Image (tube, helix red, strand yellow):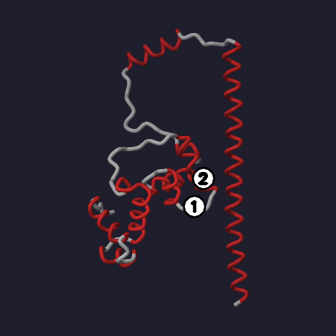
C-alpha cells in the first residue's frame, strides 16, 4: 500500500470539496483507488486535518471497547467506515481486523497479550520462587470465599449471555443466507 503525504491528501480532498471535479474523475486523475479517496474525504469531514495525518501514536483500546465495537458491527448493518467515524477511530481496517479475530477465536482474541520472547529463568530463581509459594498463606476466610463465589457467578452469567448473543447472531446470519438463496431461486424460476 502506497503511503501518501498529508499535503497530497489535503490537495486531493480540497480539489474534491471545491466542486470542480467529481470523485471518480479525481481518483482517475491522480491514479488512486476510489475507495481510498472516499475514506480520505470522510475522514477529513469528520476529523479535519487530523483525519488525513498518519497517526504516529499507537492508540490502545481496552478489551471492553473492542468487544463493544465488534458487537455493534455484528448486530447492525453499518460499514466499517461508518462505525469508525461514529466511534472516533481513524483506521476502519482495525475494526475489520477485530471482527475477523472475533469470528475465528471468539472474544478472547480481543484481549491484550504480551508480545516478544518469554524470559528464561535460571534454576536459582526457580528454587526461590518455589520457596516463596510454600511460604504464602492462603486466605480461606468466609468473606474471601464469598467474594470469589460472587465473581464466579458473575462470570458465568456473562459467559452465558455472550454465548446466547453469539448463537442469536449466527442464527440471524443463517436466516439472511436462507432468504438470499430463496430470493435468487425465485428469480431463477420466474425467468
Mark 1, residue position: 78
Please state, as top left, top right, bottom left or bottom right, where the C terminus lies in the image.
bottom right
In percent of width and height, residue 165 lies at 69, 49
Query: Quick check: marks 2 and 1 in contact, CB under 8 Å?
Result: yes
Q: Is 53 left or right of 161, judged from the image as shown?
A: left
Find the residue positioned furthest to the bottom. Answer: 191
Indicate the position of residue 108 as horizontal and vertical percent values: 56, 42
Task: Please provide percent x and percent y for residue 57.
Answer: 35, 44
Image height of 130 relative to 118, above or below: above
Local SS, label 2:
helix
Q: Which mark is residue 72?
A: 2
- Mark 1, other Cα within 10 Å: few <14 / some 14–19 / many ≥20: few
For residue 35, the mark is none
Position of 117 with respect to 111 (left or right) is left
Which is more toward the observer, 99 or 34? Answer: 34
Residue at 48% x, 56% y: name it: 85
Q: Residue at x 62, y 58 (%)?
A: 76
Query: At numbered mark 1, what does the secondary structure look like: helix, strand or loop?
Result: loop
Amino acid at each position: 500500500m502506497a503511503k501518501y503525504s498529508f499535503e497530497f491528501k489535503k490537495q486531493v480532498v480540497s480539489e474534491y470539496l471545491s466542486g470542480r471535479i467529481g470523485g471518480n474523475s479525481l481518483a482517475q486523475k491522480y491514479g488512486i483507488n476510489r475507495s481510498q479517496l472516499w475514506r480520505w474525504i470522510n475522514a477529513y469531514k469528520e476529523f479535519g486535518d487530523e483525519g488525513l495525518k498518519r497517526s504516529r501514536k499507537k492508540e490502545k483500546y481496552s478489551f471492553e471497547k473492542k468487544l463493544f465495537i465488534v458487537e455493534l458491527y455484528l448486530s447492525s448493518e453499518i460499514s466499517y467506515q461508518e462505525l469508525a467515524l461514529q466511534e472516533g477511530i481513524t483506521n476502519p481496517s482495525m475494526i475489520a481486523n477485530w471482527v475477523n479475530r472475533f469470528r475465528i477465536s471468539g472474544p478472547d482474541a480481543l484481549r491484550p497479550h504480551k508480545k516478544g520472547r518469554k524470559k528464561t529463568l535460571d534454576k536459582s530463581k526457580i528454587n526461590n520462587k518455589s520457596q516463596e509459594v510454600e511460604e504464602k498463606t492462603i486466605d480461606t476466610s468466609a468473606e474471601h470465599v464469598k467474594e470469589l463465589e460472587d465473581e464466579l457467578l458473575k462470570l458465568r452469567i456473562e459467559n452465558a449471555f455472550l454465548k446466547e448473543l453469539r448463537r442469536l447472531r449466527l442464527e440471524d446470519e443463517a436466516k439472511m443466507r436462507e432468504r438470499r438463496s430463496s430470493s435468487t431461486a425465485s428469480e431463477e424460476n420466474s425467468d
